[in-house]
């Protein structure tokens, strides 16, 4: 115990009449939603980096947070873990996620990094056994240290590739040891700033070899979790190779990895790529590569990946609608890849941010489930595509341009445009949110 959250009692479900700002009004872990407990539908996770490692800096100023566990040694790393597991307990969070760099001090070489990671992994294992908190995913930070400034797997220097590969191996070992349900690769520096100094084709080949080695190692150690790649179009790198779901899918297909790797889709990244969150989810589901989500939102005025906690039940409802339509989460879940504002200094702010976000997601999930049960959107789709149920329409898909053209002439086919009814469908959705 660090005593950091000492005055804060575990957050409980109090229903819509509940008072106090640290209570769930919508998130009732035991409520059954479409045949599953809400906790098992949503599979929430706390992100260690934002909630415990981020110092509160912005481009104009450094640290604002004054956490007792800030310090670069193992004693502080353990204190950080104590505080993190206290937060998980207060929130009743079933899962957490971490990068190696969030949980251990930065060593002078790989051996020191490895020692720190192995030590904290055992410390986590003990705490996980006592508390029942599980690991949604582990990952390696291959973007903060200056050695990675020109990329990790795509670095022009093979020694950086080697360092990154050794680091990923160590993080996969830690994730496996902790029973992680997934392993994530987010390539924030895999891309380029200028083609003037970049061999784009070679970098893509190297990135594919790296990912193939990750898949091989997964099988070698018997890791049963899912390997996930997290798309993002830019930031920190100007052009990132894992641009969006469509780009990642093309990459996986090109290198024969589409059966081995799925995607972790983040709200703010979808937005940066010019898509909606639900577009990315629905496309990944249609392509058979939907894995997990990073839940957050961007500031609409800043055009930057601001990683705020979700605050819009309507948006979240459409995301969960497509997740539920795809069969819900398998090994994936809802990771709050989100951080406080840098003025939010109190321990209660960290609790409140998660409580509010969990409630927003619960509202979204319930609205999505109600829409599915009502069937209104399915019915609208069925009606809009009804023409394709005609056997002649199906036969056309197996024919050719010649015969289609002949039939259009013979039957004088002259299609009449029909309303897309978008406003009515939007009004329909709002009845459930
Ligand atoms: C950054 C990413 C990062 C990944 C994990 O924008 O979202 O936080 O989720 O490396
Ligand atoms: Ni992000
Ligand atoms: Ni993320």
Image (cartoon, rainbow, N blue to C red):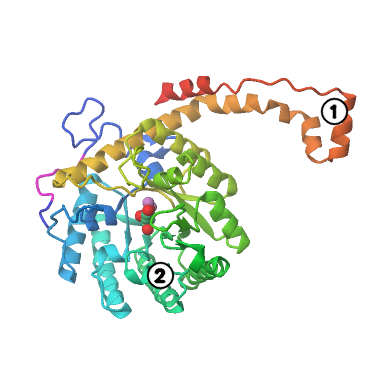
159 or 369, which lies in front? 159
Q: Is residue 7 magenta?
A: yes
198 or 56, which lies in front? 198
Mark 2 to mark 1 CA distance (whole Å): 58 Å
Asked if ligand 1 lies within 8 A of label 2, the reply is no
Confirm whether residue 28 shows in the render: no
Q: Main secondary structure of the magenta part?
A: loop
Query: Residue, x 21% and y 50% (percent of image)?
Result: 87
List x then y, in percent, for residue 10: 18, 43
For residue 295, which quarter of the picture? Answer: top left
Query: Residue, x 13% and y 46% (percent of image)?
Result: 346
Secondary element at tag 1: helix
Q: Is residue 105 left or right of residue 36?
A: left
Give the label, 2 or 1, closer to the camera: 1
Q: Which residue is mark 2?
A: 168
Total tally of numbered discs in the picture: 2
List x then y, in percent, for residue 108: 26, 78
Q: Which residue is mark 1?
A: 408
List x then y, in percent, for residue 312: 35, 33
Q: Is residue 61 magenta?
A: no
Which corner quadrant holds the C terminus?
Answer: top left
Specify start and end residues of the magenta stretch as a single range.
5-11
List x then y, in percent, for residue 200: 55, 65
Confirm whether residue 247 shows in the render: yes
């Amino acid at each position: 115990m660090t005593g950091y959250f000492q005055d804060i009692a575990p957050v409980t479900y109090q229903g819509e009449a509940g008072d106090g700002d640290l209570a769930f009004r919508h998130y009732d872990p035991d409520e059954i939603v479409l045949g599953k407990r809400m906790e098992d539908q949503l599979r929430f996770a706390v992100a260690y980096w934002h909630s415990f490692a981020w110092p509160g800096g912005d481009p104009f100023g450094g640290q604002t947070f004054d956490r007792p566990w800030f310090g670069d040694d193992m004693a502080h790393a353990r204190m950080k873990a104590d505080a993190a597991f206290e937060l998980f307990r207060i929130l009743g969070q079933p899962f957490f996620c971490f990068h190696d760099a969030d949980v251990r001090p930065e060593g002078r070489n790989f051996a020191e990094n490895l020692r720190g990671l192995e030590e904290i992994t055992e410390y986590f294992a003990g705490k996980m056994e006592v508390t029942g908190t599980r690991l949604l995913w582990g990952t390696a930070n291959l973007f903060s240290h200056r050695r990675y400034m020109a990329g990790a797997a795509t670095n022009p220097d093979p020694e950086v590739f080697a360092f990154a590969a050794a680091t990923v191996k160590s993080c996969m070992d830690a994730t496996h040891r902790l029973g992680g349900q997934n392993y994530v690769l987010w390539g924030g520096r895999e891309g380029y700033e200028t083609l003037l100094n970049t061999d784009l084709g070679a970098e893509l080949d190297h990135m594919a070899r790296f990912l193939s080695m990750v898949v091989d190692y997964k099988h070698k150690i018997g890791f049963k979790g899912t390997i996930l790649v997290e798309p993002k179009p830019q930031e920190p790198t100007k052009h990132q190779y894992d641009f969006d779901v469509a780009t990642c899918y093309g990459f996986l297909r090109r290198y024969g990895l589409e059966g081995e790797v799925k995607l972790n889709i983040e709200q703010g990244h979808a937005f940066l790529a010019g898509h909606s969150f639900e577009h990315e989810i629905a496309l990944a589901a249609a392509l058979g590569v939907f894995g997990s989500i990073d839940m957050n939102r961007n500031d609409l005025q800043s055009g930057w990946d601001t990683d705020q906690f979700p605050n819009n039940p309507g948006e979240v409802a459409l995301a969960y609608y497509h997740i539920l339509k795809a069969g819900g989460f398998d090994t994936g879940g809802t990771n709050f890849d989100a951080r406080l504002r840098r003025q939010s200094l109190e321990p209660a702010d960290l609790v409140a941010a998660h409580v509010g976000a969990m409630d927003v997601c619960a509202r979204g999930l319930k609205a999505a489930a109600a829409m599915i049960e009502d069937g209104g959107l399915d019915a609208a789709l069925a009606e809009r595509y009804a023409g394709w149920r005609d056997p002649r329409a199906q036969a056309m898909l197996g024919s050719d341009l010649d015969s289609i053209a002949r039939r259009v002439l013979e039957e004088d086919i002259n299609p009449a445009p029909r309303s897309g009814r978008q406003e009515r469908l939007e009004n329909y959705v709002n009845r459930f949110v």
